Image: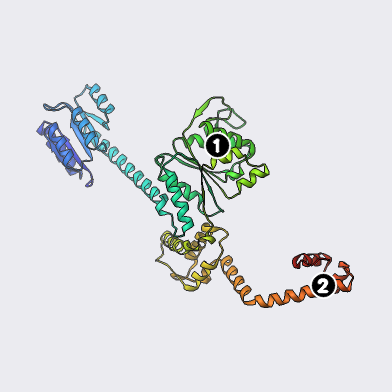
Amino acid sequence: MKNFNLLIVDDEQGQREILSGYLKKKGYAVYTAGSGEEGIRLAQRNAIDIIISDFKMPDKTGIEVLEAVKIINPEISFVMVTAFGTVENAVKAMRLGAYDYLAKPIDLDELDLLLERIIENKNLKSENQYLKQQLEERFKISSIISQSPRMEEAISLAARVAESKATVLITGENGTGKEVLAKAIHFISPRKNHAFIAVNIPALSENLMESELFGHERGAFTGADKMKKGRFELADKGTIFLDEIGDVPLPMQVKLLRVLQEQQIERVGSTETIPIDVRIIAATNQNLEKKIKDGTFREDLFYRLNIVAIKIPPLRERKEDILPLIEFFLTKYAKENNKAAFSVSKEAIDFLMKYSYPGNVRELENSIERAVVLARGNTITQHDLPLSIKGFVAEKTNELQEGTLIELVETLEKNLIVDALSKSNGNQTQAGKLLGLTERNLRYKLQKYGIKN
């Protein structure tokens, strides 16, 4: 209790001394004031957590003290002490922001329970605030790791659009960090105190997609035994992130377009329109303009989504980011696995820099996590890396070393094929027999070398 400062405001000295002595024995730091004015001054000068104030005092009422305290610091919990039977005073105090009230004479057991509830509530609020700060820290724009000019351009654009209500379309390959950027936009926007709802479109059943997005009423379809809010309604005043928007079926695209245009939804099984205030961020790894030409994506929906377009480059095109990302993931997974700080050998760095990362940042992160878990010491070597990375680098190295030999073999093979076709007067079946190849293999070689028969 030492971390909690209590202030007792009461014009009766005996009452102050009894409560003060009792609460000090319980471990609280206790201040006392013999008047309302003195209580207000003490609240201004000290970090008070809880005030226990009498209602009736000569200079100021408890209500007046409460109103002044809420201006000084609204986080101070206020307990009003009233005479038995004056419930209307307690109700007024609660309406003005008092946490609770106690009737005279004060029951000390009741006081203990009330203070415990207040402290528990304060601790919970403090913990929630800490978690919220951690979340904001994790997803704020400045925490996105980047050194490459192209990624910096994308981050700069995201930071500028965050303050607005504009719809954003983020494009990029799988694993590039589209959702991370969407969360960063949300958590530095005016909507950061409201929900961020992420929807993975491919994971939704086509039959239930409308219900998942817009909700349904009880009895709307078989199994709908109660009303359910959809993702858009849950995201009201916040942000909804529609991941892989290119996979939305055409019939649902019409309904999404209506939501974007009118900012209102209808639950399945209802004709009532529900207004919503939702910021939409969509993402895709597909070429939506090509899908428009193919007739699988609506052009009008595309232009509604594409108000601000942000393209995240693949990791292979921003290799400047690989080393700082490695350092970040090393620290993260060493901490998660209760291991000491890690370093990476020169050879392993060489492998990691040469790799093409078809899975982008997500693949790099998984590779580093695996290496941290499996490494025998605190230095990650090339032997700790996944086979996909080691095999890729080895193959590329062999290609460089054996390039001249491969070219010679291919030239020889091409000449033998041309010679066999000449001897067989262009008969592919006969030429294949001369070469020891099936007709199918021969056709593949002809196509490979561009030999016209």
Q: Position of residue 372 (x, y in %)?
A: 47, 65
Of 337 and 243, the residue lying toward us: 243
State the CA–CA distance, disc 1 to disc 2: 62 Å
Residue that carries the numbered disc 1 in the rendered image: 213
Q: Choose top left, top right, bottom left or bottom right for residue 441.
A: bottom right
Q: Amino acid at mark 2?
A: Val
User: At x 79% / y 75%, what residue is drawn?
Assistant: 415
Q: Are marks 1 and 2 in contact (CB under 8 Å)?
A: no
Residue count near mark 2 (Cα–Cα under 10 Å), binned few <14, some 14–19, many ≥20: some
Quadrant of image for the C terminus:
bottom right
Residue 130 as seen in the image, left or right of residue 103: right
Q: Position of residue 350 (x, y in %)?
A: 51, 71
All told, the count of numbered labels is 2
Residue 276's label in the rendered image is none
Furthest residue in direction left, as rendered = 13
Q: Mark 1 or mark 2: which is in front?
A: 2
Picture layout, residue 374 above or below residue 191: below
**Do we see residue 357 in this rendering?**
yes
User: At x 47% / y 63%, what residue is drawn?
Assistant: 320
Residue that carries the numbered disc 2 in the rendered image: 418
